[in-house]
Amino acid sequence: LLQSNVGKRKAQIAAIRRSFGDLVLNVDCDTEIASDVVSKLVRKMQDPAVGAAMGQLTASNRNDSWLTGLIDMEYWLACNEERAAQTRFGAVMCCCGPCAMYRRSALMLLLDQYETQFFRGKPSDFGEDRHLTILMLKAGFRTEYVPDAIAATVVPDKLLPYLRQQLRWARSTYRDTLLGLHLLPGLDRYLTLDVLGQNLGPLLLAISSIAAIAQLALTDSVPWWTGLTIVAMTMVRCSVAALRAG
């Protein structure tokens, strides 16, 4: 416990500096972990090449509303499609904060870089999980996903807090992707494709939507093909997602 609330990053750093074990487990305060999570993550960390490993996240309040149910499905996909594929090709690009285990010796090497990260001239106060993962990869460690290490976390049940959370995460994704671009040539080509898809997909969707609105405003013609393409791609993606997530 620190004297005042100084944010997640400084609290993490204080805890890591006071720690003494070989491994450090990070668990968010709104998260409950299954009884076998530690042993399953430790098993993965027995390989000295692995610097960090994360468990599978679920929404503990998934039954509260339609939004929490959809977020639970989103978490399932993020873990069991995205992270599972990334670990197959050697590097999870973001070990999520609710349940992640780190090699303490690696953390101690990276702590000064982690503590002194600046963004637009100010000390960074967001994107801790992704930045710490990028630093691990930069130092030459592997990062892994362990699907049977289950952690349940509370997710937003109202749209506005959810959108604020997503905006914060998106800022972190774009910022740390730029910082980690030089890592991609040394990783599997699938990971380059994955990172480019994650970052370019939303931008292309935004450009398409703006172009459609401009066409409607300037020419009075309805952009049917743009609209139908976006709807069709959304339906295909959501159908596959719903089927995979059950």
Image (cartoon, rainbow, N blue to C red):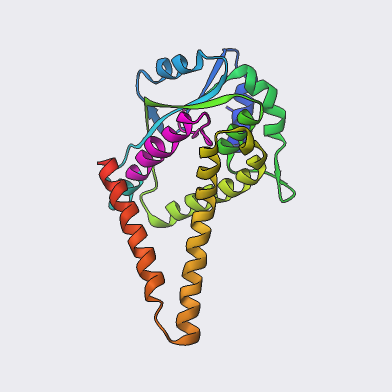
Q: Residue at x 39, y 81 (%)?
A: 222
246 sits to left or right of 35: left
Q: Residue at x 28, y 51 (%)?
A: 239
124 sits to left or right of 79: right
Observer-nearest residue: 85 or 31? Answer: 85
Q: Assign the C terminus to one quadrant of the image.
A: top left
Residue farthest toward the front in the current orientation of the protein: 189
Residue 181, how many percent across, how many down? 64, 42
Residue 112, how many percent across, how many down? 72, 29
Observer-nearest residue: 105 or 163? Answer: 105
Residue 25, how many percent across, how many down? 50, 22
Asked whether 31 falls inside the magenta stretch, the response is no
Residue 50, how many percent across, how many down? 55, 20
Q: Residue at x 46, y 15 (%)?
A: 42
Q: Residue at x 29, y 41 (%)?
A: 245
Asked whether 75 falls inside the magenta stretch, the response is yes
Observer-nearest residue: 27 or 175? Answer: 175
**Magenta range:** 72-99
Looking at the rendered structure, the number of numbered marks drawn on it comes to 0
Observer-nearest residue: 83 or 160? Answer: 83
Q: Main secondary structure of the magenta part?
A: helix
Q: Does residue 58 lie above or below 15 as drawn?
A: below
Snapshot quadrant of residue 77 = top left
Snapshot quadrant of residue 103 = top right
73 sits to left or right of 100: left
Residue 107 visible: yes
Q: Assign the N terminus to one quadrant of the image.
A: top right
